[in-house]
């Protein structure tokens, strides 16, 4: 037989045609467990050319779905006078998980990293020795390049040998009188458009070469920003905090902070000339 035995497909069909009295909360939990593909520009699936779900991830997703489904069956038995019924159980509201990770693993060891010097943007930054370098071929343009992904043109980029994680660094001129808050709001309006009203709740403080900055968790990536004089320096990890590809590094935030710890502005550096 050629029947589709994919567990996500079977469960989705069951939710559409299955029990009509499944509680809304349980239905939402099951649907949340199913992998989905966002169509937004900042989708976790956007960068590069990989991301077919691997076997381990598919098995883990199927196991999670099975656990939720069993929980749903027990819920129905208890809620409908079945075995062990104790009447309706009060529901609880879970607090949302933090958007920006706070790793308890400590800093990443960068002692064996290689240093890359950007003459275009006048900074140096370290990266794992086996990560290929993809130098920028022109300056970064805002807002034109902010709407492209991933990575945007005009960025100094480093990626894993498997090409499943990438880090980019660049700088761009900021308009006179810009503050971190106003610039981030303008930037977010280009990269996310409709989800820029709660940036503060998705932001933590970071530092780079003695300069204070802000690390923001966007929908599908994580980026750090440093307003120094009239230029905004940006270092971005093109993955969300909990994406499976960054879990070996302790999350996108921890990986990004590792790069920031190696980054230095070159003395006497000047703004890049237009190409």
Image (cartoon, grey):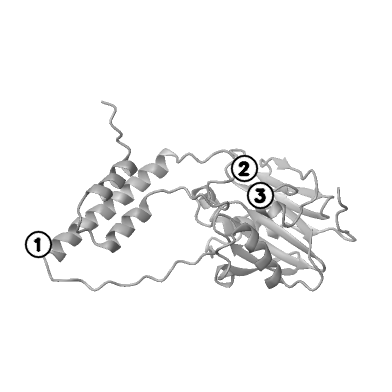
Q: Are marks 2 and 1 in contact (CB under 8 Å)?
A: no
Q: Position of residue 83 (x, y in %)?
A: 9, 61
Dot 1 alpha-carbon crowd within 10 angstroms: few under 14, some 14 to 19, many 20 or more: few
Dot 3 alpha-carbon crowd within 10 angstroms: few under 14, some 14 to 19, many 20 or more: some
Q: Is residue 123 left or right of residue 163?
A: right
Residue 81 found in image quarter = bottom left
- Outermost residue to the right: 268
* Numbered label attached to residue 160: 2
Tell me how far mark 1 sits from mark 3, CA to CA: 55 Å
* Precedes in sequence: disc 2 or disc 3: 3
Q: Quadrant of the N terminus?
A: top left
* Precedes in sequence: disc 1 or disc 3: 1
Tell me how far mark 2 sits from mark 1, CA to CA: 53 Å
* Numbered label attached to residue 82: 1
In this view, the residue in front, 219 or 195, is: 195
Camera-near label (1 vs 3) is 3
Q: Which residue is mark 3?
A: 148
Local secondary structure at mark 3: loop
Camera-near label (2 vs 3) is 3
Local secondary structure at mark 1: loop
Local secondary structure at mark 2: loop
Dot 2 alpha-carbon crowd within 10 angstroms: few under 14, some 14 to 19, many 20 or more: some
Q: How many marks?
A: 3
């Amino acid at each position: 037989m050629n029947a589709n035995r994919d567990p996500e497909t079977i469960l989705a069909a069951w939710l559409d045609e299955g029990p009509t009295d499944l509680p809304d909360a349980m239905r939402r939990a099951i649907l949340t467990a199913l992998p989905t593909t966002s169509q937004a520009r900042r989708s976790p699936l956007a960068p590069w050319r990989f991301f077919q779900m691997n076997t381990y991830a598919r098995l883990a997703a199927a196991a999670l779905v099975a656990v939720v489904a069993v929980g749903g069956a027990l819920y129905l038995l208890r809620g409908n006078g079945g075995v062990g019924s104790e009447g309706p159980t009060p529901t609880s509201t879970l607090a949302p998980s933090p958007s920006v990770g706070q790793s308890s693993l400590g800093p990443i060891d960068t002692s064996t990293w290689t240093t890359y010097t950007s003459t275009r943007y006048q900074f140096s930054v370290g990266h794992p020795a086996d990560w290929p370098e993809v130098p920028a071929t022109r300056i970064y343009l805002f807002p034109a390049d902010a709407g492209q992904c991933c990575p945007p043109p005009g960025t100094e980029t480093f990626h894993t040998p498997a090409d499943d994680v990438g880090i980019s660094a660049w700088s761009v001129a900021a308009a006179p009188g810009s503050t971190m808050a106003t610039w981030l709001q303008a930037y977010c309006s280009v990269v996310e458009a409709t989800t820029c009203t709660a940036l503060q709740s998705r932001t933590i403080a970071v530092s780079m070469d003695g300069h204070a900055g802000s690390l923001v968790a966007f929908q599908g990536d994580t980026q750090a920003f440093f307003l120094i004089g009239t230029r905004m320096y940006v270092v971005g990890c093109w993955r969300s905090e909990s994406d499976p590809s960054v879990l070996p590094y302790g999350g996108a935030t921890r990986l990004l902070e590792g790069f920031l710890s190696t980054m230095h502005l070159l003395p006497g550096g000047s703004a890049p000339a237009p190409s």
